[in-house]
Image: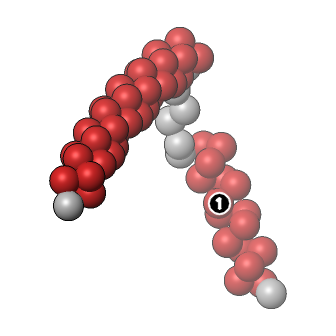
Amino acid sequence: MNKVIDFVKASVDEMANKVTWPDYASLQKSSFLVLIASLIFALLIGLIDLGFENILKWVYNAF
C-alpha cells in the first residue's frame, strides 16, 4: 500500500512542479487546429466512402 501512496505523491508532485502547461492562447490555437484537421479528415473519408459506394452500386448493377 505504501508503494501506491508514494506513486500518487510523486505523480502529484511531478504534475505540479515539473510539467510545463501551455498558456490559454496556445491551448485555444491548438484546439482550433485539431478541430479543423478533424473536419478535413472527416470530409475526406466521407468523399472516399461516397466514391466506393457509387463504384460498388455500379458494379452490382452491371452484373
Q: Quadrant of residue 2?
A: bottom right
Can you see residue 56? no
Kindly identify the residue that appears in the image at 54 percent across and 32 percent down: 21
Kindly identify the residue that appears in the image at 42 percent across and 21 percent down: 36
- Look at the image and tell me in which quarter the N terminus lies: bottom right
Q: Disc 1 marks which amino acid?
A: Ser
Q: Quadrant of residue 4?
A: bottom right
15 up-or-down from 32: above or below:
below
Q: Farthest residue to the top: give it.
A: 25
Residue 17, percent from left and from top: 60, 43
Kindly identify the residue that appears in the image at 28 percent across and 41 percent down: 54
- Whether residue 60 sits left or right of residue 37 in the image: it is left
Observer-nearest residue: 10 or 40? 40
44 up-or-down from 63: above or below:
above
Kindly identify the residue that appears in the image at 59 percent across and 17 percent down: 24
Residue 44, percent from left and from top: 31, 33
Observer-nearest residue: 63 or 44? 63
20 up-or-down from 36: above or below:
below
Residue 18, percent from left and from top: 53, 45
Q: Quadrant of residue 33?
A: top left
Q: Residues within 10 Å of mark 1 (few under 14, many from 20)?
A: few
Q: How many marks?
A: 1
Can you see residue 8? yes
- Look at the image and tell me in which quarter the C terminus lies: bottom left
Residue pointed to by mark 1: 11
17 up-or-down from 7: above or below:
above
Residue 61, percent from left and from top: 26, 52
Disc 1 is placed on an element classified as: helix
Q: How is the image coloured?
A: secondary structure
- Whether residue 13 sits left or right of residue 42 in the image: it is right
Observer-nearest residue: 36 or 30? 36
